[in-house]
Amino acid sequence: MFARLMRITGIAAMLVIAACSPETRYRTLSFFFDGVPDPSKQAAETKKRGTAAAEAAAHQVRSHGPYAARMCDACHKADGVGLIMPVENLCQNCHVLNLGKKHVHGPVASGGCRACHDPHGSGKPFLLASDPTTFCFTCHDRKEIESREVHQAAADTQCTECHNPHGSDNDYLLR
């Protein structure tokens, strides 16, 4: 009889606690039990882990699919010397790019994907060869671009937020 009463009391207490805020639940449960995790500390830990995971992902080397799968013959001849087709056609053998745009970025138009992308792997997004925040300045004059009024407000953004790096029907490859 006593055990049944304790079970009913426990169930009733849990139902009442379930309706409470996390802080009230924590205070109530920690009164009866040791080791109840503090929700405010858990939130801080979760945020800290999320930030660490984001930083780790940002520095993670991403591999091109065929390279990661060791499918070298998807791009290279079986003897390991040379490519299966001219380099300017190779990427479009698997990747579909709409080259029918009014304006096509120079490297894309000439099949120069490797001017921007590393075909094996990179620690940058989209297998870019260098940091996306400064990447475009490898070819484009930073001082000249930053001197234009339209770019004054965009000093801390990536070029690709406004410009399509492959092609666009709009002038200046605007999205």
Image (cartoon, helix red, strand yellow):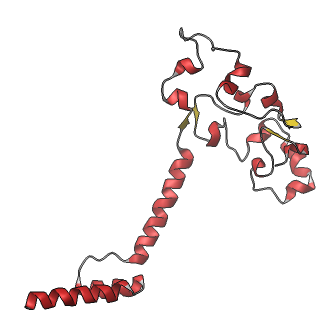
In percent of width and height, residue 74 lies at 57, 21
Looking at the image, which residue sits at the far left? 1
45 and 11: which is toward the camera: 11
Q: Is residue 166 above or below residue 161?
A: above
In percent of width and height, residue 9 lies at 21, 90
In percent of width and height, residue 164 lies at 79, 44
In-image side of 83 versus 146 (left or right): left
Q: Is residue 81 above or below residue 64?
A: above
> At x 92% / y 56%, what residue is drawn?
149
75 and 151: which is toward the camera: 75
Indicate the quadrant containing the N terminus: top left, top right, bottom left or bottom right: bottom left
158 and 78: which is toward the camera: 78
Q: How many marks?
A: 0
> At x 81% / y 57%, what residue is drawn?
154
> At x 87% / y 42%, what residue is drawn?
169
In-image side of 142 versus 76 (left or right): right
